[in-house]
Image (cartoon, rainbow, N blue to C red):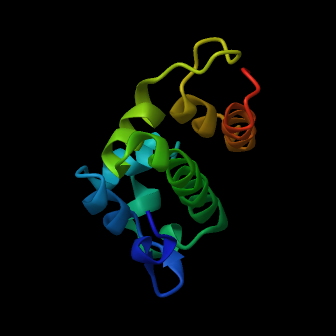
């Protein structure tokens, strides 16, 4: 997933992310740990929190997409695969709890051959 394809006027656009992942903006909000208003109201879409959560989600999907071969499979992994060492939480659950950096560190560790 190229970052530019998910942006509109320099901001992550929930609708563009949703279109690529064949889902809705409301579902993107939920999987990023945001309320529905965060992706529907223009002032909220551009807020720091909304943009940070969307960026974190896209960064994680970008990082794992090559191993799954598509953005859709990476999104399925993000939503449903429990991560070892995180009490069976998924990447989505960790991002929703503000732990995106832990997910990125885990992916880096796995890529480096360290079994986290």
Quarter of the C terminus within the rendering: top right
Q: Residue furthest front?
A: 113
Work out whether residue 89 can be spotted. yes
- In percent of the image, x 51 and y 67: which residue is there? 44
Position of 42 relative to 98 (above/below): below
In percent of width and height, residue 55 lies at 58, 60
Q: Identify whether 61 is placed above or below 89.
A: below
The answer to which of 82 and 43 lies nearer the viewer is 82
> Residue at horizontal 32%, vertical 56%?
25
Looking at this view, name the residue that lies furthest to the top. 87
Task: Identify the residue shown where x is 36% and y is 51%.
Answer: 71
Image coordinates of residue 97 in percent, x first then y, are 65, 34
Q: Is residue 77 above or below residue 4?
A: above
Residue 50: quadrant of the picture: bottom right
**Is residue 109 shown left or right of residue 36?**
right
Residue 4, position as x, y percentages in the image: 47, 78
Residue at horizontal 67%, vertical 42%? 100
């Amino acid at each position: 997933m190229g970052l530019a394809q998910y942006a509109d006027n320099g901001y992550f656009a929930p609708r563009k992310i949703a279109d690529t992942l064949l889902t809705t903006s409301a579902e993107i909000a939920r999987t990023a740990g945001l309320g529905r208003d965060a992706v529907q109201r223009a002032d909220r879409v551009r807020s720091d929190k909304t943009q940070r959560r969307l960026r974190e989600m896209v960064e994680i999907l970008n990082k794992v997409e090559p191993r799954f071969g598509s953005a859709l499979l990476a999104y399925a992994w993000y939503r449903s695969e429990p991560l070892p060492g995180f009490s069976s939480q998924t990447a989505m659950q960790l991002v929703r709890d503000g732990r995106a950096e832990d997910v990125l560190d885990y992916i880096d560790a796995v890529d480096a051959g360290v079994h986290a």
